[in-house]
Image (tube, rainbow, N blue to C red):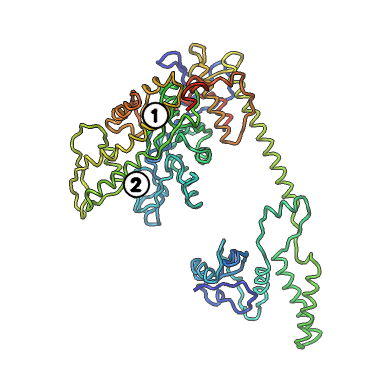
Amino acid sequence: MGRYDDTTDDRPDPAAEDPTTVRYRFKGLVRSTGQPVEGHANGETEETAYAALSEHGIVTESLTPDPEPLNLNRANQPLASAIDSALDTAAAQVPFDQLTERFKGKNVWVLDRDKIRSRVAQVVDQALAQAQQTTGTDVSAIRSSVADAIDGLFRDNKNLTSQVSNNAIQMDRQIQRMEAFTHKAESLLAQMTVAISRMGTGGGGFGPQRYQGGSGVIPQEQNQVLVEIFKENLRLRGIEIDEKPPADATVAPSGEAPADSPAANN
Amino acid sequence: MAEQSQGGGHIRPVAGKSILSGSDVDSGANEKALLLGIDLGTSRSSIVSMTGARKTVESYVGYPRDAVSRKMLKTDVVYGKAALDNRLALNLFRPLEKGVIKGTRDDAGVAEDEQRKNLEAAKHLLRHLVETIHPGRDEVLFGVVGVPSRATSKNKEAILAIAREVLDSVMIVSEPFTVAYGMERMSDVLVIDIGAGTTDLCRMHGTVPTEEDEISYTIAGDAVDQKLHDLIMAKYPRAQLTVNMCKIFKEQYGFVSDARDKVEVEIPVDGKPTPHDITAELKQACEILIQPIVEGIHKLVSSFNPEFQDRLRHNVLLSGGGGLLDGLNKRIEDAMQAIGGGKVTVVEEPMYAGANGALQLAIDMPGEYWQQLR
């Protein structure tokens, strides 16, 4: 059977007790409210974890194996798991693209899960060591020292966050500009190619190979067909050619019904 | 590096030589290009190359289900008829549906994962198709791929995406158009291309057909197979029959003409091969193609310039696998009496007509167009 956990539960994790049970990290939505939720679920297989989440009214969006770190003395060290669970509970899913748009060009500091975990562990460990030296086995004094240490830790945001490099965002922008430039260049090149091919065999241009070296006359009809196919394929690649419509563009092609024909009026 | 064709006056590229060298034209395309015409079909896919090589593969791709089937088949991917024959040991894909990659139609309703697998299978199929004609190691591959006439941009982009991973430069062109182009009949012609997934009608008037020039129906080879299956099962409920068996019967004996010998096939009943007379069912199933085709012809003719309508009616070309059905052109001609009569001709090599035309187009296409599209 599976188990789902998004609380700061410090009971021993069944995944650690039962070697066949795997801990999975999930992200999903509460079925009844639609609120994003993430945390851990345990199960022998993915299916059992999915089932456990479903039983708890959670629609799972992603589920990845996230085994518990090896902890030989787990019963005495529930802290790491508690911090993880606390962070899971406090976290909320947000559309990342919106965030990048909103903070474009700014220096951004984000909460760093690993940093928090290691700093909390470090501070608590130091506080315990110091308290033991100074106050002996006075439990209340030890608790007070730990509380002060954690309070101090959370006073400075630098203990909890890491700066997101602005370079990546700038790089993205540069790539976008290069893409736009390449696109423009491709379009221009295609335009030149089409223009050259329309010049026919004279004047350095050339037409379809089937007629090269033959009578010397390129059927304009066929040349136009090849140009159209080429342009259509450029369009499929997202390359548009800005061309002025030919002067006789208003004249209907031979096969199509003229504007005043009965067929056209149907 | 080009040679004079027997037809006189035409210059054709030579395999393995640069496509535009040896003349005073500097195309900047001094490479050994192998030009290909490809018809990616729902049921069968064909390829023809400028070297003269041509192959047809059934459009199936299979992946071994497990280690045992992998060991038995001794390969990671199985194609064509081999895939169909070993389908019990394979995860079998028929990556094309109604002429386009499955899942790329707006109404397909295929899961994203399924679509990804079909794209992958289509890519493998195309790669296999190209490998069957053994291109040289130092040759660049330029290919024209035919798609159904009413394929959407999304369909075309999907095919383009996979083709670009296999070929060096690709062009996507409407299939009926390639048929007409290959026959050098680009004006006042109406092409009917009957495939497995779609029946495409396209009128040609000397330029690239637009949407108004094309009609596509999904009543095609697959629909005939299904209809035949339903009819046989209705008549012989104990027959153990699959749609694939019906497809084989259709391809072997399919007809719509009035005069025909009895068609008797062996179908298992309780595991025992038993002869069954399917003459009437086969004819009835094949006939479902006629009515939509005639309606399509009527629509395309009636909306054409009245001065050219008669010429169009008398220049109807029938291609694709459906063109092989015995007597289909005559039956269409008979049905066309109601709209003023006409002449329907089955093209030479209906199965390869699309790929042949695509190759012709690839050959005629100026080298710098190919380079531009790389």
Badge 1: chain ID: B
Q: In the rendered image, which residue does mark 2 sit on?
A: B84
Q: Does label 2 lie on the same chain as label 1?
A: yes
How far is disc 1 from disc 2 in space, using C-alphas?
39 Å
Pair 1/2: label in front: 1
Residue A76 left/right relative to B175: right
Give above or below for B254 relative to B112: above
Front-lying residue, A93 or B87: A93
Residue A161 visible within the image:
yes
Element class at badge 1? helix
Q: Looking at the picture, which amino acid does disc 2 mark?
A: Leu
Q: As drawn, is A203 to the left or to the right of B320? A: right
Residue A33, above or below A222: below
Q: Chain of mark 2?
A: B
Give the residue at x 54% y 19%.
A207
Tag 1 residue: B298
